[in-house]
Image (spheres, rainbow, N blue to C red):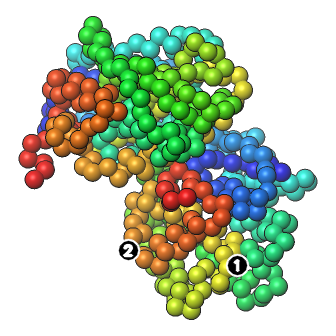
Amino acid sequence: MTMPTHLDPFTHAQWYALGRDEDFPDGRKTQTRLLSQDLTVLRRGRTIEVTLPQGQPRPTQHRYGHVWTTFSDTPRALYDIPEFEEVERRLITAGAVHVRCSGLRAVENFLDMAHFPFVHTGILGVEEHAEVEKYDVSMDVERDEIWATNCMFFQPVAAATAKAGGTTKYKYRLPHPYSVILYKTCPPRPGEWDLIGLFIQPTEEDVCIVHSFVLVFDQDNTDTELLHFQQNIFLQDRIILENQIPRRLPLDMRLEIPTRADASSIAFRRWLKANGVTWSTVRAGDME
Amino acid sequence: MKLYDYVLSGNCFKVRLFLKFLDVTCDLEPVDFFPGCEHKSPTFLQVNPLGQLPVLEDGNLRLYDSQAILIYLARKYDSSGQWYPVNDPETLGRVAQWTAFADGITATSSAARLHDVLGYNLDIKAARAGAQTLFRVLEDHLAHQEFNDQHWLAGSQPTIADIACFPYTALAGDGGIETFIFPAIERWLCRFSMLPGFHNMPGMNYFT
């Protein structure tokens, strides 16, 4: 298989979500794109086949409510999310939303707390409480992933279950260049964390499909109420993402000046750079 | 009163926003339009055989079609008669004309948005071209209105016609349709966003 120009080995080696299990009805072919290549997805009974245009099959797996594939014959293992095994949690998958930006930009926006008061006004933030307090960023060397911890933010309606405003604790996990998982205080169960995450399908260098999920302890809201909450938030982000220039992610720290609140995205960009990621990033010579 | 609602639907937003303008409360029944396609389920087809949102229930009345719902709410809850001016035949005729025009915006601009945001399989070029044609008509009309000191679609006051045409014009960018080339439309969108009680839906970012 020939690799598209600029496709680096680390990006090539990942597993990617292509959609929810139920998005692929039995016997119907679905055309999609991944890393600037065409793919066909076909369900036959309980098996899903993913093939390249000349019919070469690619491996698949079903995890976290989604169908995954990889272009690599020696892929980097798909990360574990142990919370998916906890039976009391509810999984809501929010479907595929197309966005005209680099998937890496979508990851970064998800990490960014500073935008809450201005983009998710009245829900995830208020303008009177705009400061991002200092948080910690660390590297899990064994698993080769990034964690941002001890994040705190004042939120008027942190979740569909929130009854009043309050300071929400957050943790962020970056186990994959195109996945990001948020752990946040669970209003009905102090001490537990609710999970919200993005599995991003980078279709082109500057276009992506965002598959998102909510994995929560919640007995008050219906699945559809949780779905509406999640989609409302993500579509507020989408208009911001589509207006970022350039659409690909700059890894050179001189191109976009970070503040202390951006510690997690600084770590993310360094991690991408250390892993030799060039696909979907701004490269030397792109900007004059 | 109960509204079958989808948070990302511009047609549902029309009704939610008008309820806000009228200061009328209403329960929301969220429907999994995407990705669950619940509006085409047998259960929902019992509520609306067309399989479309929104649907309003008020007592024994069940109404579908967002424009019909706007008319009902205006006649029932707007004592000023501003939003649906039944006593002024000329204005009322223009309200009906521009309310019908909104269906064309839905068929084109909303379709382009469903394609670009949610991956619907449809003729995107035709959808965008259709929207452009309608927006040129809307632009000419609004510019003409401004020359005559009429700042709204049907006259000097906002009516349900403005509410009906607003969402999928404001959300045209989601479907890859630029509206900055239509300055009178941009000014009208901005005026609309300053109406008391206005709030954004996702995809809009007017200063409120």
Percent coordinates x, y for residue B28 in the rendering? 74, 45
Residue A246's place in the image compared with A85, above or below, is: below
Q: Splitting the image into 4 quarters, where does residue A115 fall? A: top left
**Disc 1 with disc 2 on a shared chain:** yes
Q: Is residue A181 visible?
A: no
Tell me: A168 left or right of A240: right
Percent coordinates x, y for residue B106 in the rendering? 57, 64
- Number of marks in the rendered image: 2
**Which residue is label 1 attached to?**
B96
B124 and B28: which is toward the camera: B28
Tell me: B139 left or right of A257: right
Q: Chain of mark 1?
A: B
B205 and A196: which is toward the camera: B205
- Residue at position x 57%, y 65% from top? B193
Choose mark 1 or mark 2, whichever is in front: 2
Q: Splitting the image into 4 quarters, where does residue A122 fall? A: top right
Secondary structure of the residue carrying numbered label 1: helix
Residue A128's place in the image compared with B205, above or below, is: above
Q: Chain of mark 2?
A: B
* Pointer 1 local density, CA inside 10 Å: few below 14, some 14–19, many at least 20: some
Percent coordinates x, y for residue A19 in the rendering? 45, 32
**Which residue is label 2 attached to?**
B181
A253 and A279: which is toward the camera: A253
Q: Which of the two labelled residues, at mark 1 and mark 2, occupies the earlier sequence position?
A: 1
